């Protein structure tokens, strides 16, 4: 090996290189293993922390929705709530026949035109049309006039009015129930509460947005998620349950995301349950955000400076606010703009101050969580930043949500990066120490070698008195000579073995098909297999026996060898595999080692080529030779027989039929079986033979390929 051909290096230098290589390798391996171990432990710890936070938040949010569901079910079964719905419904119907105040239409139009629509237009594409939002019925106009348009409280505080001074039965009821319902949503943190009659009219709300006193079956809000939730609850005809619908943009809340949960209200009439309407609650996004952000105390939750836990819906849009929108809104919005998020979505995020229903989260972690899987991954988040992510689906009836806890990879791996720097510094200092130590050790080690070199020079110069010293110390020279002799011997033996292997391989390939030869080389002994869908070709040279009477044995063998050689070379082009020759008979199979869909066509084409070869051969040498061929398709059994002298052969009825066809074939013709005729009658012209071909006890119908 000549020490990696570093012939210009001294033994001392080579020894130093070896010592440095071994020591540096051990240092690098130790450092790498330590680094990987530290990184793995830190990653596991980070993932465990994320998973713990994720599980905690998942439990909180699931419990929160369970509490809401239980609360609304309890409220819907409360007789006082049912009574309030009944009384509000009756009072609402009474207002359909009252006279509206003279300024009602103007004030309602003014409110929508100057207050509601401009705010809605900030987040909606296009310009909202006022006529599509105005209340239609007299009762709707009456109530929106007194409780919204003529309400002196500012927008967002319309719910502070307990009673309008109109003297109506509705206002009397409103004065009685409104403080109670307002207290409920304030105590439980709900956004709004709705009482909806069986026809889908919102006969009461706490917050008094523009859906108050409108219909969920006709009008501007008949396609809202609240309308679909009401329709679902009304169709179900079930009691003692609550149904939830996912967040969607809700126009009465100026397009802000809104989710609702609703329960049916039934009462007993003549011993039977009667559907009275629906109690619905607008789920507060703020409460969900408080749970997911830990009241905006991410670091207290163990999420550091970049970690967050958020919710994603089945549409891969957020269902809770992004931490980065809360802490660094302008930087967050700039990131979205850089990532190509459309301006309308960024404008809505800026207007609503929330990423709910606006921030797309189509990461690998989110996709797996939405499909019901949970786990941990190293992914790029919705900001296209590498993060560690722990994800899982949420178990909330009616919602297909996922929860993800993530932290920036840079922050999670900050300790390992510090460790990496310290490791590099320590390894560098250690390498310097090893270099000095290696130089000192090499000087000590090569001292006797230098003495041997000096003795060798003396011997080379003819000073034979140094031979004795060399005999006791020249171990390196003796080892080199022995090794070189051994290498030369091994090279000679290897070359001999390779030559023998090439000869054996060539011999195998000349006797067996390539695939069988390969299997024999690999050590297989008993080779036998059943092969389906092959075509067998049997041929006989006619006139060859007469020719042999007039020629010497050497000439006969030479002629036959020339013909068979041409057949063998031609067979490779058509995918035919020669099995054997018996005298002047030649057998080949197509589809044996390599399957072909057109094995029968290949066999016929090869047979036609064999006819042409024999005709040319006869014309060139002035012989009276011809060839008869039989071809049949089917299944065969192939294998090697014999122990000391073995051959590769094929058996089966397919072989017998092909042989029978060959034996019955007229001179210079090709006979095929009925199976081949049925498959290839549209490619070749066939004529039935006059006599039937006998195969044992069976009579076979045969077809002759029409000569061209």
Image (cartoon, rainbow, N blue to C red):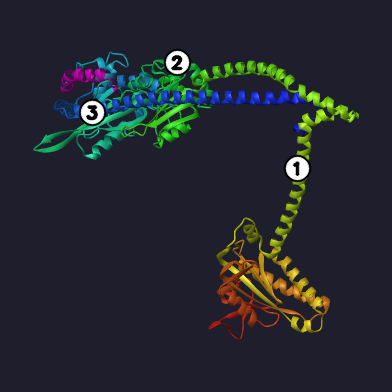
Q: Quadrant of the N terminus?
A: top right
| The quadrant where residue 373 appears | top left
Tell me if I can see residue 87 in this picture. yes
Residue beneath the point at 55% across and 26% down: 33
The residue beneath circle 1 is: 486
Question: For this view, does 562 lie left or right of residue 212?
Answer: right
Asked whether the residues under the numbered discs 3 and 2 touch, taking CB atoms below 8 Å apart as contact, a structural biologist would say no
Question: For this view, does 150 lie left or right of residue 525?
Answer: left
Q: Is residue 181 magenta?
A: yes
Query: Could you say which disc has been placed on residue 327 in the image?
Result: 2
Q: Position of residue 422 (x, y in %)?
A: 57, 16
Camera-near label (1 vs 3) is 1
Kindly report the distance in space between the C-alpha atoms of the residues bearing marks 3 and 2: 34 Å
Q: Is residue 165 magenta?
A: no
Report helix, strand or loop for mark 3: helix
| Mark toward the start of the polypeptide (1 vs 3) | 3
Nearest the eye: 509 or 539: 509
Q: Which residues are drawn in magenta? A: 169-191
| Mark toward the start of the polypeptide (1 vs 2) | 2
The residue beneath circle 3 is: 70
| Mark toward the start of the polypeptide (3 vs 2) | 3
Nearest the eye: 515 or 594: 515
Question: For this view, does 677 lie left or right of residue 347?
Answer: right
Camera-near label (1 vs 2) is 1
């Amino acid at each position: 090996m000549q020490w990696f051909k570093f012939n210009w290096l001294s033994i001392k230098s080579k020894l130093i290189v070896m010592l440095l290589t071994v020591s540096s390798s051990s240092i690098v391996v130790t450092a790498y293993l330590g680094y990987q171990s530290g990184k793995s432990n830190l990653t596991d710890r980070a993932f465990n922390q994320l998973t713990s936070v994720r599980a905690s938040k998942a439990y909180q949010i699931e419990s929160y929705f369970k509490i809401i569901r239980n609360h609304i079910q309890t409220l819907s079964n409360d007789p006082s709530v049912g009574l309030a719905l009944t009384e509000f419904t009756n009072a609402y119907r009474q207002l359909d026949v009252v006279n509206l105040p003279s300024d009602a239409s103007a004030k309602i139009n003014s409110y929508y035109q100057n207050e509601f629509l401009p705010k809605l237009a900030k987040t909606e594409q296009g310009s909202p049309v006022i006529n599509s939002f105005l209340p239609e019925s007299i009762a709707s106009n009456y109530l929106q006039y007194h409780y919204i348009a003529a309400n002196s409280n500012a927008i967002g505080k319309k719910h502070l009015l307990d009673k309008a001074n109109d003297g109506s039965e509705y206002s009397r009821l409103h004065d009685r129930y409104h403080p109670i319902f307002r207290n409920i949503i304030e105590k439980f943190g709900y956004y709004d509460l709705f009482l909806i009659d069986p026809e889908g009219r919102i006969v009461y709300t706490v917050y008094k947005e523009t859906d108050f006193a409108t219909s969920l079956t006709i009008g501007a809000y008949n396609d809202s998620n609240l309308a679909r939730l009401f329709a679902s609850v009304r169709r179900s005809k079930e009691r003692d349950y609550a149904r939830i619908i996912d967040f969607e943009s809700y126009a009465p809340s100026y397009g802000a995301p809104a989710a609702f949960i609703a329960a049916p209200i039934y009462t007993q009439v003549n011993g039977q349950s009667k559907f009275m309407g629906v109690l619905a609650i607008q789920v507060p996004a703020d409460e969900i955000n408080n749970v997911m952000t830990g009241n905006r105390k991410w670091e207290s939750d163990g999420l550091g400076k970049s970690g967050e836990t958020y919710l994603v819906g089945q549409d891969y849009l957020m269902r809770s606010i992004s931490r980065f929108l809360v802490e660094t809104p302008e930087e967050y919005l700039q990131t979205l703009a850089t990532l190509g998020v459309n301006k309308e979505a960024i404008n809505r995020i800026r207007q609503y101050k929330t990423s709910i229903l606006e921030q797309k989260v189509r990461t690998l972690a989110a996709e797996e969580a939405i499909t019901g899987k949970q786990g941990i991954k190293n992914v790029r988040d919705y900001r296209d930043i590498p993060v560690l992510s722990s994800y899982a689906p949420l178990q909330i009836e009616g919602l297909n949500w996922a929860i993800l806890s993530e932290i920036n990879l840079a922050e999670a791996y900050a300790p390992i990066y510090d460790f990496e720097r310290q490791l590099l510094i320590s390894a560098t200092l250690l390498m310097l120490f090893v270099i000095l130590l290696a130089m000192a050790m090499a000087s000590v080690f090569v001292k006797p070698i230098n003495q041997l070199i000096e003795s060798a020079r003396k011997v080379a110069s003819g000073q034979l008195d140094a031979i004795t010293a060399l005999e006791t110390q020249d171990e390196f020279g003796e080892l080199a000579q022995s090794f070189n002799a051994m290498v030369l011997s091994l090279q000679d033996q290897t070359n001999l073995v390779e030559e023998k292997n090439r000869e054996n391989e060539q011999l195998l390939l000349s006797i067996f098909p390539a695939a069988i030869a390969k299997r024999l080389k690999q050590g297989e002994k008993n080779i036998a297999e059943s092969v389906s869908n092959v075509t067998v070709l049997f041929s006989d040279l006619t006139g060859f026996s007469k020719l042999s009477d007039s020629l010497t044995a050497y000439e006969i063998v030479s002629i036959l060898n020339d013909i068979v050689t041409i057949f063998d070379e031609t067979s490779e082009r058509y995918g035919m595999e020669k099995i054997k020759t018996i005298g002047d008979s030649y057998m080949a199979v197509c589809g044996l080692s390599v399957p072909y869909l057109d094995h029968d066509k290949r066999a016929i084409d090869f047979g036609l080529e064999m006819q042409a070869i024999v005709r040319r051969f006869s014309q060139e040498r002035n012989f009276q030779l011809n060839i008869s061929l039989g071809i049949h398709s089917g299944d065969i059994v192939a294998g090697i027989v014999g122990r000391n002298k073995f051959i590769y052969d094929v058996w089966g009825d397919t072989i017998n039929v092909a042989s029978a066809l060959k034996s019955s074939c007229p001179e210079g013709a090709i006979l095929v079986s009925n199976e081949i005729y049925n498959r290839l009658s549209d490619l070749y012209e066939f004529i039935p033979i006059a006599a039937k071909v006998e195969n044992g006890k069976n009579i076979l119908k045969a077809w002759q390929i029409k000569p061209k």
